[in-house]
Image (spheres, helix red, strand yellow):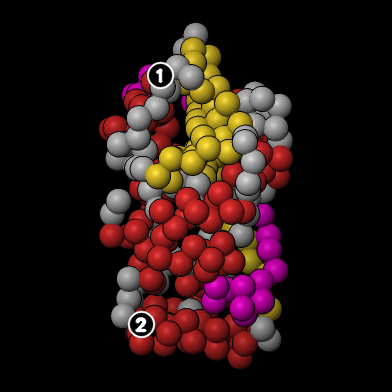
Amino acid sequence: MSEFAATFDKDAAGYAAGRPGYSQEIFAALEERCGLGEGTRVIEIGPGTGQATGELLRRGAHVHAVEPGPALARHLLTEYPGERLEVTVSSFEDSVLPEGGADLVVAATSFHWVEPEIGAPKALSVLRPGGAVAIWWNLFYDPRGPDEFSRALDPVFEEFGDVESPAFVDTRQEEYWIPVLREAGFDEVVAERFPWTVDQTTEDIVSLFSTFSNMRLRPDDERKQVLARIGGVADDQFGGRVRRTYQAVLYTGRRPS
């Protein structure tokens, strides 16, 4: 597990509180394209605190979650007790999984932590013929360009350096992820984006920024200063409530029959 990825396991409760869930459109697409439903055998890569796991379980799936963080794994088992959830504490690359046993492999805002030359072929191998893969991300930016709040944070970025997620660049590149899945052997690979708008309080915004891995790697005093500055911008310039447009990007593919 990389130094960045390991930061999430240090504060499972904070990550759960700070990160929003996923659009229902994502799960509707999984039902339509990938056969998600009652009894679907799902392998979930890097579920974290279970923002996607809970929805998969609610839709009837049996989920085998592969989570490298022990604290996050414990959080999952506490949050979603029941026989339809199994958790293995391991990186996906090192996990021992039966070949051809899954109907669906998913990764929600996590596949950028997996070595793609290992992870994508392994995802193919654990699927039954005709099984599907779905990887997606919440991207915390406006697809039309920097919004008013982003521009208001420019002085903070200039003073402290980049405080956004280091995964942003990788996760929004269809020209990268589509070839990764195709070269691993997946067919029917497609990408779709789902814009969504959310009203966030100052507390919501500070909590979200506090979950970004490169924020968590900063010295404590500096991290507190940055978060205080971000909260101050939200309070002083936006009255403590900011409407932001984000987007989710979903990639799906299928193992040839």
Q: Secondary structure at mark 1?
A: loop
Q: CA distance from mark 2 to mark 1?
A: 44 Å
Residue 30 colored in magenta in the image: no
Please provide the residue range marked out in magenta: 183-208
Quadrant of res 100:
top left
203 or 247: which is nearer to us? 203
Residue 192 colored in magenta in the image: yes
Q: Is residue 170 left or right of residue 207?
A: left
Q: Secondary structure at mark 2?
A: helix
Residue plotted at (63% across, 46% down): 81
Image disc number at residue 88: none
Q: Which residue is mark 1?
A: 99
Q: Which residue is mark 2?
A: 220
Indicate the position of residue 77 as horizontal and vertical percent values.
Answer: 56, 49
- Camera-nearest label, 2 or 1: 1
Neighbor class of circle 1 (other Cα within 10 Å; few <14, some 14-19, many 20+) is few
Three-letter code for the amino acid on which mark 2 is drawn: Asp
Residue plotted at (35% across, 35% down): 95
- Would you place residue 182 above or below residue 165 in this image? above
Three-letter code for the amino acid on which mark 1 is drawn: Glu
Indicate the position of residue 60 as horizontal and vertical percent values.
Answer: 70, 32
Indicate the position of residue 4 as horizontal and vertical percent values.
Answer: 32, 60
